[in-house]
Image: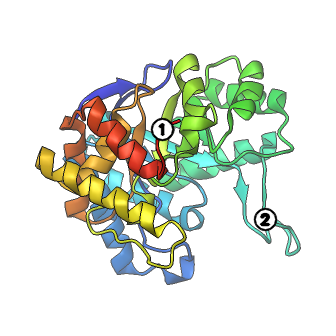
């Protein structure tokens, strides 16, 4: 795959990232079996062998088990750590933490950020996280305190660069005002069924500030992929059906699958979007890499965009 720098940093990544949130196929630790762990470790190795160099995780993925599985898989491959970038996220707290009556919430307190980083490092069995991100915006965020936490982690050698996830432009601007280092990424939901980032200023800000947009769920949870189908009860069923037809026509034209076209559509944007591939199916992990070789024409890009909008351009 081709590579690009992440934001205004020296981190060099492939155009596609591999996401670890599905590694054990569940969010419930009680449902994790030895077979699921083996399958998750295999997916990590397949992604590495397929050429992915940016691996994205989060402390909440199956309550930290995905980080552990990723770390164990990496340890089994000689030299892998030196050839990849590791990203993870913090800031979401489950109900019952730390007390039985604690509500679900977001927590950007210095204590929680520092403690979460320590725990992620231990689970993944590494000394440094290459890209550490705040997972969802905490309305009680004190940007000066967050900046201080980032500085502490960098000075301690526990995190190299920092970013955010699911932040609107105003939150990014507020935090950046206090951070001495440039925020490297904003990980947001971007796909043909979720076009908000094209209209709410997120991608414009990414270009202006040299922030890399990382696209989670780039296939809309699967329905934009080759095997995806539209629920006839979906209120936007007619629009989605037309979109899939357009994607299939374009895929035939380029001689690839619908999955590849959906990913290539994101890669075409000048903001240098990095789609996060989250499948644990080895064939699909390898197939997604092909999107990096497809350069959609402007005409084809807009034909797909218009179909996704479900209405003509203004």
Q: Alpha-carbon neighbours of circle 2 within 10 Å: few (<14), some, or many (≥20)?
A: few
Q: Alpha-carbon neighbours of circle 1 within 10 Å: few (<14), some, or many (≥20)?
A: few
Residue 174, by quadrant, is top right
The front one of 116 and 107 is 107
Number of dots carrying numbers: 2
Return the residue found at the far left. Answer: 255
In the rendering, at what x and y percent does residue 85 appear?
Answer: 40, 37
Q: Is residue 23 left or right of residue 171?
A: left
Residue 298, by quadrant, is top left
The front one of 67 and 268 is 268
Q: Are marks 1 and 2 in contact (CB under 8 Å)?
A: no
The front one of 299 and 55 is 299
In the rendering, at what x and y percent does residue 217 appear?
Answer: 46, 55
In the rendering, at what x and y percent does residue 29 appear?
Answer: 55, 76
Judged from the image, the secondary structure of the residue bearing numbered disc 2 is loop
Query: In the picture shown, does residue 231 fall above or below 247?
Result: below
Q: Please give the residue where the numbered disc 1 appears in the rendered image.
A: 313
Q: Residue at 69% across / 17% down in the picture?
A: 180
Query: In the picture shown, does residue 296 fall above or below 151?
Result: below
Pick whichever of labels 1 and 2 is earlier in the sequence. 2
Is any part of residue 224 visible from this angle?
no
In the rendering, at what x and y percent does residue 154 appear?
Answer: 62, 26
Is any part of residue 111 visible from this angle?
yes
Q: Residue at 37% across / 76% down in the picture?
A: 36
Q: Residue at 44% across / 76% down in the picture?
A: 231
The colouring scheme, among rainbow, by chain, secondary structure or one colour, is rainbow
Q: Is residue 289 left or right of residue 137?
A: left
Judged from the image, the secondary structure of the residue bearing numbered disc 1 is loop
Instruction: State how far apart marks 1 and 2 are (Cα).
Output: 40 Å
Q: Please give the residue where the numbered disc 2 appears in the rendered image.
A: 104
């Amino acid at each position: 795959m081709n590579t690009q720098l992440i934001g205004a940093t020296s981190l060099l990544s492939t155009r596609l990232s591999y996401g670890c949130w599905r590694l054990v196929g569940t969010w419930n630790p009680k449902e994790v079996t030895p077979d699921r762990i083996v399958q998750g470790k295999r997916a990590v190795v397949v992604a590495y062998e397929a050429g992915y160099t940016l691996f994205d995780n989060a402390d909440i993925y199956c309550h930290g088990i995905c980080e552990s599985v990723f770390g164990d898989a990496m340890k089994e491959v000689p030299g892998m750590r030196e050839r990849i970038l590791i990203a993870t996220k913090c800031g979401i707290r489950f109900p019952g933490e730390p007390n039985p009556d604690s509500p679900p919430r977001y927590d950007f307190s210095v204590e929680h950020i520092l403690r979460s980083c320590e725990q992620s490092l231990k689970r993944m069995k590494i000394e440094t996280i290459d890209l550490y991100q705040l997972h969802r915006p905490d309305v009680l965020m004190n940007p000066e305190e967050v900046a201080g936490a980032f500085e502490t982690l960098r000075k301690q050698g526990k995190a190299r660069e920092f970013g955010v996830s699911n932040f609107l432009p105003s939150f990014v601007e507020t935090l950046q005002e206090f951070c001495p280092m440039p925020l490297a990424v904003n990980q947001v939901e971007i796909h043909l069924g979720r076009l908000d980032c094209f209209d709410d200023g997120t991608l414009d800000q990414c270009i202006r500030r040299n922030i890399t947009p990382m696209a989670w769920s780039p296939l809309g949870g699967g329905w934009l992929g080759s095997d995806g189908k539209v629920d006839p009860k979906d209120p936007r069923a007619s629009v989605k059906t037309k979109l899939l037809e357009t994607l299939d026509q374009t895929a035939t034209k380029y001689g690839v699958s619908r999955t590849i076209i959906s990913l290539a559509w994101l890669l075409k944007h000048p903001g240098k979007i990095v789609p996060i591939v989250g499948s644990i199916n080895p064939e699909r992990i390898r197939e997604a890499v092909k999107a990096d070789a497809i350069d959609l024409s402007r005409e084809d890009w807009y034909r797909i965009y218009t179909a996704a909008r479900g209405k003509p351009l203004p």
